[in-house]
Amino acid sequence: MEKGDHTFDDAIISQFTIMQTIVENPLVFADKAGDPSKIFQEPETSWIPDACAQFDYLRDSSKLEILEDILEDKMENEKRGIVWYNHPKTFEFLKQNLEKYNPICITADDSDEERISKAEYFKKHDEHKIILASVNVLTSSVTLSPEATFLIYYE
């Protein structure tokens, strides 16, 4: 198979989302690291590099440090906001490492009623500085202004 071959191009295009996810958070695929020669036999995830399995978020990513710098700046100005995530593994990492901001967490496991209830609770309780919310589940039907004065898309 050579570059320019229809099958080769299709394989690369179909893997773009996975490659983008690996760049954002290699931990999402840490348990699927495999042999790169299998990209055409098992194109879903078998080719994912072994480096994903060895990735340590605190050691290998500067994103958390940058996020904390931004949040500290916002807290100094008594701002409250939303930190959006995309993957459940990222959520677990953020939840653990951002405890000092007393986040309200809105996940795919929450019902629509729970999501609305948590958003309303955030509006009324200033001790919660951020909402950690999945970009896939907190809809535009939830209005958090003027309480949430900033949005950060972590992924």
Image (spheres, rainbow, N blue to C red):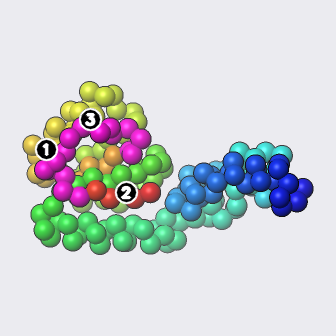
Question: Camera-side residue: 112 or 17?
Answer: 17
Q: Which residues are magenta?
A: 134-150
Residue 60 relative to residue 150: left or right? right
Give SS at disc 1: helix
Q: Which of disc 2 and disc 3 is earlier in sequence?
A: 3
Give SS at disc 2: strand
Residue 65 is marked as none
Residue 129 relative to residue 51: left or right? left
**Circles 3 and 2: CB distance less than 8 Å?**
no
Looking at the image, can residue 136 be seen? Answer: yes
**What type is the residue that disc 2 sits on?**
Tyr
Residue depicted at 39% across the width and 33% down the height: 109
Residue 123 is marked as 1
**What type is the residue that disc 1 sits on?**
Lys
Residue 153 is marked as 2
Residue 141 is marked as 3
Mark 3–mark 1 Cα distance, whole angstroms, equals 15 Å
In the image, residue 111 lies at what x, y percent? 33, 28
In the image, residue 78 lies at what x, y percent? 12, 63
